Every structure is written in C-alpha cells, then in structure tokens.
Image: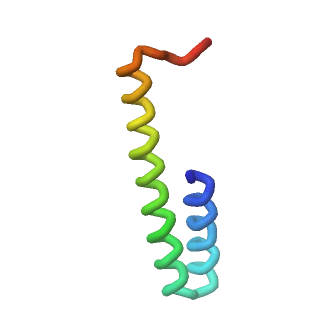
Amino acid sequence: MLGWAVVFFVIAIIAAVFGFGGIAAGAAGIAKILFFIFVVLFVLALISNAVRGRGPKI
C-alpha cells in the first residue's frame, strides 16, 4: 500500500511540473489517503504484536 502511495505521489509531482493542476491535486489526495491508511494499519499491527507478546525474531 505504501508503494501505491509513492506511485500516486510521483504522478502528482510530474503532473504539477507539466501544469496539470487538477490531476496533480487528485493524485496527491489519493496518495495522502493511502499513506494514512498504511500508517493506521502499521500502528494496529504493532499494537497487535505487542498485545500478543510476540516480538521481532532476531
């Protein structure tokens, strides 16, 4: 999911450079939403592992 956020961010940067403001804003909005979903799922996974008592295996 983080990969998709990066792809949409790159699309937004390229669209902004070429002057496509609407496309850039849309891609940036999608990238922002995907990034925050990724962060929420990551935090939930960390909390879930902490509650279960399983730490990272080194």
- Figure check: 23 above or below 55: below
- Figure check: 6 above or below 56: below
- Figure check: 51 above or below 58: below
x, y (%) of residue 46?
A: 42, 30
Report which quarter residue 15 is drawn in.
Answer: bottom right
What residue is drawn where x is 45% and y is 62%?
A: 32
Q: Quadrant of the C terminus?
A: top right
x, y (%) of residue 22?
A: 49, 86
- Figure check: 22 above or below 50: below
State the count of labels. 0
Q: Is residue 10 left or right of residue 29?
A: right
Residue furthest top as drawn: 58
Q: Nearer the viewer, residue 43 or 9?
A: 43
x, y (%) of residue 27?
A: 53, 73
Q: Which of 47 and 2 is in front in this view?
A: 47
What residue is drawn where x is 44% and y is 34%?
A: 45
Q: Which of 44 and 25 is in front in this view?
A: 44
Q: Nearer the viewer, residue 32 or 1?
A: 1
What residue is drawn where x is 56% and y is 65%?
A: 9
x, y (%) of residue 4?
A: 60, 59
Colour scheme of the rendered structure? rainbow
Report which quarter residue 16 is drawn in.
Answer: bottom right
Q: In this view, does 38 lie to the left or right of 13?
A: left
Report which quarter residue 50 is drawn in.
Answer: top left
